[in-house]
Amino acid sequence: LSYITKEELRVLIAIEMGLKNHEFVPIVLIEKISHLKHSNVYKLLGPLLKNKLITHEIQKKRFHSYL
C-alpha cells in the first residue's frame, strides 16, 4: 500500500464508510464523505480499479457504484 496517495486513501476510506449503510457506494456519496471534487474522485478511482482495490458496478444503466 505504499504506492497509494493521500487522496486515494481518502477515497478508500469514504467507500469503506459508505459500505456501513449501502451494499454499493454511489459516486455522489464518495464525493460527499471524502470532501473531494467530482472530477478528482473520478481520476482517483481509475488507479484503485486498476490495482483491484475496489470494484465497479453500473446499476440501472445510470448509477455507478463502487465496492
Image (cartoon, rainbow, N blue to C red):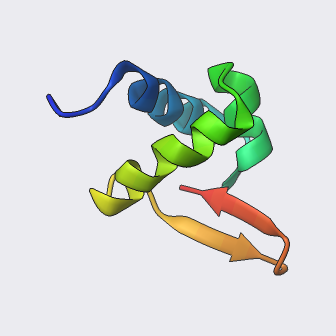
**Front-most of residues 49 and 67:** 49
- Quadrant position of residue 33: top right
**The N terminus lies in quadrant:** top left
x, y percentage for residue 26? 74, 51
x, y percentage for residue 50? 32, 61
Q: Residue at x 59, y 35 (%)?
A: 40
Q: Residue furthest left?
A: 2
Q: Residue at x 37, y 19 (%)?
A: 6
User: Looking at the picture, does residue 8 appear above or below residue 27?
Assistant: above
x, y percentage for residue 52? 31, 60
Residue 20 visible, this angle: no
User: Looking at the picture, does residue 53 appear above or below residue 2?
Assistant: below
Count of marks overlaid on the render: 0
- Quadrant position of residue 60: bottom right
Residue 41 visible, this angle: yes
- Quadrant position of residue 46: bottom left
Q: Residue at x 47, y 63 (%)?
A: 55
In the visual, does 11 lie left or right of 59? left
**Front-most of residues 14 and 44:** 44
Q: Residue at x 59, y 47 (%)?
A: 42
x, y percentage for residue 9? 40, 27
